[in-house]
Amino acid sequence: MRQQRTFNNKMGFGKLCTGTLMSLCLMWGLTAHAQHSAEPVPAGSEEASAAASATDAGGAGAEPEKWNAKFQATYVWQRKPSFSAPYTGEKSLLPGRERSYSFTTTASLGYRPWAGGEVYLDLEGAQGIPLSGLAGLGGFTNGELAKTSGAKLKLYRARAFLRQTWNQGGEQEAVESEARQLAGMVDKRRTVLTVGNLAVIDLFDNNRYSHDPRTQFMNWSLMAQGAFDYAADARGYSWGAVLEWFHDDWEVRFGRFIQPKEPNGQPLDYRIFKHYGDQLEVAHAHTLAGQPGKLRALVFRNHAVMTRYGDALSLAAQTGAVPDLNAARYGARSKQGFGINLEQALSDDVGLFARGSWADGKTEIYAFTEIDRSLSAGLLIQGRKWGRANDTLGIGVARNFLSSTHRQYLAEGGVGAFIGDGRLNYKPENILEMFYSVAISKQSSISFDWQHIRNPAYNADRGPVNALAVRLHTEF
């Protein structure tokens, strides 16, 4: 994805912001008009428990939801002050002050054509301008910017898929009405097949405390496994199939998705048996000190026309040129990796997440971001104790790493999809993100976010970098 590197002028920025803000305010107005006047019941309260019990007791006899329609809109404004940088390369984060914004809006439609069958369609619109043309970081500061396509609003189909569930007995559990999910009852022992156009991380690497940049942490290395180079086009979507098996507290899922035709490109290669991304995940739900949690283990393998860093370095040594990934793209290569993902409630109002991921780092980044190894953790805290039950405080940290050949490639002047300072004084990229989300209504919120990044793009000669953001979100 190619983006312009800076705003042309303040007037242009104002006009662009005005259009997106007007759309968001309109959706807020519709939400406020439709919402119930009663205040939501705080999580963990006796009233909430009683309501949940009543739902469970009566859910088995309730008719499954035939269809639903869900909508969301998210606007993020971000500002980066200037920072110290003795040099700047082709794919560096620019050291001067910058502003960025993103706007996305989604209509999610679901329909149940037969028992156990569900079909979904997501129509999405996106626009935005990233910091430095989306360059200069491993952990980018806004997860929504992967979907944007410049200063003009772009409308597209984001998802279109079929889900078939075969119930196989055991206890039943309620499924709530959400985007891409119809309400009803399902067996805790079941098999599910999903086929079509969707995002790999719709089903893999989920975490209730850190997965959605529209309402939770925004940094790319906090919202997902940093080293999970999952198959996707430039907006984060692909085509494929996932088979899932649920057995009480256990879950196993395997999926294959198609890759883009070129690294981080928008057009997809539909030869699913030639170039693909495979992932296998095993999850287990548990209870620790009376609080629920879940542990997930993921392995993945990508096969596509990717350049090995070693090949680019060898060619550069022979020719005396700067190493270039494009000059050494000889054919299909494979990349392997794995990740561990923990979510754990510490109380009714506090949840912890932790992730660790590793990729072999021999080949270029193909569809996500320039991270070969990553560790992340954090807390999500509801505000009930200070009288703001629907407010959320988030604190997260991430530490990202590169493989030895990836480091050498950058140190010799090579440029990747997202990073390339022209030289490299390597140190791990360290990220701290804190946000506070203020509930405006049951469906709307405004968040204030701060990110502090040391060694941006793994370069100790540059930074540290600070990014401040305001996020507006509504859904109904």
Image (tube, grey):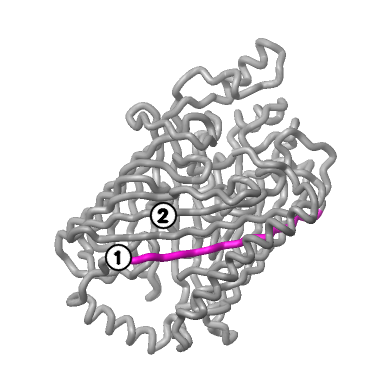
At 68% from the left edge and 60% from the top edge, which residue is drawn?
17
Residue beneath disc 2:
122
At 17% from the left edge and 77% from the top edge, which residue is drawn?
61
User: Residue 426: x and y, percent?
Assistant: 70, 38
User: Residue 77: x and y, percent?
Assistant: 68, 60
Q: Residue furthest top?
A: 318
Question: In the picture shown, does residue 37 fall above or below 20?
Answer: below
Q: Would residue 230 appear left or right of 170 to someone viewing this image? A: right
> Disc 2 or 1, which lies upstream in sequence?
1
Q: Would residue 351 appear left or right of 250 to someone viewing this image? A: right
Which secondary structure lies at badge 2?
strand
Which amino acid lies under the numbered mark 2 shown in the image of this protein? Answer: Asp
Res 251 seen here: yes
Which amino acid lies under the numbered mark 1 shown in the image of this protein? Answer: Trp
Which secondary structure lies at badge 1?
strand
Disc 2 to disc 1: CB gap under 8 Å: no
Question: In the picture shown, does residue 142 fall above or below 44?
Answer: above
Res 457 seen here: no
Q: Quadrant of residue 376?
A: bottom right
Residues rendered magenta in the picture = 68-81
Question: In the picture shown, does residue 100 fall above or below 37?
Answer: above
At 23% from the left edge and 69% from the top edge, which residue is drawn?
64
Tag on residue 67? 1
Real-space CA distance between mark 2 and mark 1, rounded to the nearest whole angstrom:
14 Å
